[in-house]
């Protein structure tokens, strides 16, 4: 076996040193990543434990029960059994609502007590009372705030999958959901759907 020269021994020693440095660097990286993951998991668990609970209520399609937008009471779909009901979801940032809600208000004035109209502020952190007052539905229609509101609104997003506003629902007199309308609903379309899907006659 040939003897190693000094240069070869130095090169081999240098390779061993470099390999040891790389091994230590890998260990440091693993420790850093592990520590970061532990902190992240802790932070997530902490946020889950302190995150505020949404307002209590039912958000099923046929049995929702929501807090009032303009008071301390509740607004539930069961309260409106006996007549067809139009439910208009709205938000302060919704440009379509600017046209739709006044139209539906005009329709509700026109047909009087034959059909219930309900407004639900959704995906808006309950900031829609000012717009409800501007549009004239505050004090005229029952108004509710969607559970959770914000982007995680329990009824509009969770139950009906709405990705924006407006959203409109029509229930028959027995309280059954008969139509879901993502996007705008004109007064004329509302009358047509009420006529087709409920016992309402123009």
Image (spheres, rainbow, N blue to C red):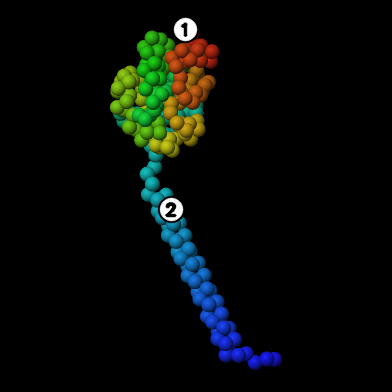
Q: Residue lying furthest right in this view?
A: 1
- Does residue 133 sit above or below 13 in this rendering? above
Q: Is residue 23 above or below residue 92?
A: below
Circle 1 — which element? loop
| Total count of labels | 2
Q: Quadrant of residue 145?
A: top left
Residue 17 in view of the camera: yes
Examine the rendered structure and indicate whether residue 191 appears above or below residue 73.
above
Q: Is residue 6 above or below residue 102?
A: below
Q: Determine the residue positioned at 31% across, 28% down.
A: 129
Q: Position of residue 98 (x, y in %)?
A: 37, 22
Q: Earlier in the sequence, mark 1 or mark 2?
A: 2
- Name the residue that disc number 1 marks: 202
What residue is pinned by disc 2? 44
Marks 1/2 in contact by CB < 8 Å: the verdict is no
Is residue 194 visible in the rendered image? The answer is no
Q: Residue at x 47, y 7 (%)?
A: 202
In depth, the one of 161 and 174 nearer the eye is 161
Q: How far apart, in angstroms, are the residues tagged by discs 1 and 2?
A: 55 Å
Mark 1 Cα-neighbour bin, 10 Å: few <14, some 14–19, many ≥20: few
Which numbered circle lies on residue 78? Answer: none
Which percent across, then down, holds residue 45?
A: 43, 53
Does residue 70 appear left or right of residue 90 in this picture?
A: left
Could you tell me residue 124's position as x and y percent?
A: 37, 33
Task: Pinpoint residue 167: horizontal percent, then vertical percent.
Answer: 45, 26
- Tell which of 100 and 17 is nearer to you: 17
Residue at position x 42%, y 49% from top?
Answer: 48
Q: In which quadrant of the rendered image does the N terminus lie? A: bottom right
């Amino acid at each position: 076996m040939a003897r190693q020269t000094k240069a070869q021994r130095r090169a081999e020693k240098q390779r061993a040193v470099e390999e040891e440095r790389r091994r230590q660097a890998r260990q440091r990286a693993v420790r850093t990543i592990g520590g970061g993951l532990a902190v992240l998991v802790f932070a997530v668990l902490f946020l889950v434990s302190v995150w505020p609970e949404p307002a209590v209520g039912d958000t099923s399609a046929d049995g929702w029960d929501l807090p009032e937008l303009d008071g301390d009471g509740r607004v539930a779909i069961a309260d409106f059994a006996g007549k067809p009901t139009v439910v208009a979801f709205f938000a302060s940032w919704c440009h379509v609502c600017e046209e739709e809600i006044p139209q539906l208000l005009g329709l509700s004035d026109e047909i009087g007590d034959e059909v219930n109209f309900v407004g639900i502020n959704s995906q808006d952190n309950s900031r829609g009372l000012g717009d409800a007052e501007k549009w004239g539905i505050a004090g005229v229609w029952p108004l509710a705030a969607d559970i959770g509101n914000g982007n995680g609104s329990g009824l509009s997003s969770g139950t009906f999958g709405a990705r924006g506003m407006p959203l409109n629902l029509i229930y028959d007199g027995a309280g059954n959901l008969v139509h879901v309308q993502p996007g705008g609903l004109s007064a004329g379309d509302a009358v047509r759907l009420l006529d087709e899907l409920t016992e309402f006659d123009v």
